[in-house]
Amino acid sequence: MTEKNTQAPAATSVPAPAAFASRPLRVAIIGAGPAGVYAADILTKAERGFELAIDLFDRYPAPYGLIRYGVAPDHPRIKGIVKALHKVLDRGDIRFFGNVDYGTDLGIAELREHYDAVIFATGAINDADLNIPGIELEGSHGGADFVSWYDGHPDVPRSWPLEATQVAVLGNGNVALDVARVLSKHAEDLLVTEIPQNVYRGLAASPVTDVHVFGRRGPAQVKFTPLELRELSHSRDVDIVLYPEDFEFDAASDAAIKTNNQVKTMVGTLANWLIEQEEREERGQAGAATASGRPRRRLHLHFLHSPVEVTGTDGKVSGIRFERQELDGTGNARGTGELVDYPVQAVYRAIGYFGSALPEIEYDGRTGTVPNLEGKVLDAAGTQVPGLYATGWIKRGPVGLIGHTKSDAAETIAHLLADLNQLPVAANPAPEAVPALLEAKGVAYTSWDGWLELDAHEQGLGAAAAPAPTPAGPVVRERIKVVDREEMVAVSRTAEQTAGART
């Protein structure tokens, strides 16, 4: 994910509607990932002639959403993104309510009673479907599910089946590269991250030798970014394997290489790796063991492969079949009729995320989004629902980087501000009403102070751990992520209890 310096569109100061002349405009944002935090930040910074109060809700005890639970722990820019989000929430002008599930702990009627506007920023956490024969076999997994496991998501199992020696990863986006990198990387090299203990133990026991990444089109059409591509070459004792027959370029590819610096960089990187590989093969150095005698792992990058069937034996994955593709001159691919089989024992589909339906809100099952017009939520008839808005992936679908998320939030906030005189005014806007409601329901919500407590606790776990031996020398762990939801809540709520004891 790439940071961009995207600012909210310039606007004149918005005057105070009569309803908000004597009290703040109260806004609830559902989802504390980048989309929700950026929406809150842009709204607080907008020029306006009235006070503002924002409450940010998340179904997890900790903030940051996909940054905490959807990005590989060794992602090179994750810390920078977390710091940016932390800076916004640490200012003190936005309240955080974690461990609160929309639709279970709070419904739309309760939100409308206490807030003048509600922004949904719930993102997309499920895998997009791939409807080919055999996809249901044991050993066939969703990439998003695997990401949730290695990121310590509190709602997924603590173990993961890692018995395969040969693995196929379907997709040519950043998530596919993250999945492939984590599968092929030696577990001890992840100890410098916040990887949970159960994930480390699982990856350390993995017998994998070969991870194959398959894309449907050519090298000039890949969806990952140069940073993620280069990160593959930083994995110790992992050979990247390329195939000359996959390097096909058509007129659209040549045009993209000439006019798009990102495409030019990625194709150049891949081409250089292919040349270096051929030179190593000529010298007889391919596949050599490491200095320590450990076997090297191999990460294969394949292009122009379209999956047609996952094959199995006794109900388990035993291989995958592809149809070879060719470019059609426009950058798109078409089948050649040639079928190719690869023996693998596990398949991970990383072809995209898909949004989930929200209770009491219209949902588009084709796109996995909330129907909206530039962030204004629509009903089944296509009419704007007053006071309801959307931003992020639940608004536009799971595409784009962090910079898109910021501009997306700016568009939604601009419409909210333009609608101030038409907002349904909350009947009970008292700031203490929502905490009282949650407590009356027995919801063990967490706060920003609670997150700071948990953050310090995870860093303390890392500091207390004995230095881990690795081929590069002992590693002192920076932090160890807590996985168990109950433990996260218990640690976080010590801050609530301490504050209560002081009052």
Image: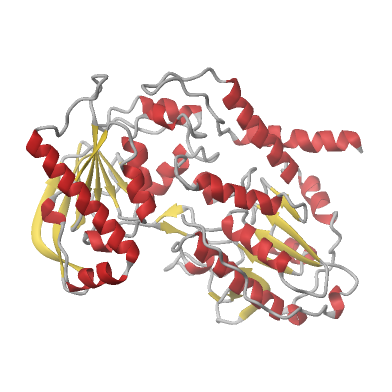
Residue 401 drawn at (x, y percent): 47, 60
Q: Residue at x 30, y 39 (%)?
A: 139
Compared across the picture, whether 125 is left or right of 301 comes to: right
Residue 474 drawn at (x, y percent): 45, 20
Residue 131 seen: no
- Quarter residue 455 falls in: top right
Residue 23 drawn at (x, y percent): 88, 68
Figure coloring: secondary structure
Name the quadrant of the C terminus.
Answer: top right
- Quarter residue 45 falls in: bottom right
Compared across the picture, whether 54 is left or right of 138 comes to: right
Q: Nearer the viewer, residue 116 or 20?
A: 20
Q: Is residue 173 above or below residue 382?
A: above
Q: Is residue 483 above or below residue 304?
A: above
Residue 345 drawn at (x, y percent): 23, 37
Q: Is residue 308 above or below residue 42?
A: above
Compared across the picture, whether 402 is left or right of 180 comes to: right
Residue 388 seen: yes
Q: Residue at x 11, y 51 (%)?
A: 340
Q: Nearer the viewer, residue 147 or 10?
A: 10
Q: Residue at x 16, y 32 (%)?
A: 287
How many numbered discs? 0
Q: Nearer the viewer, residue 3 or 417?
A: 3
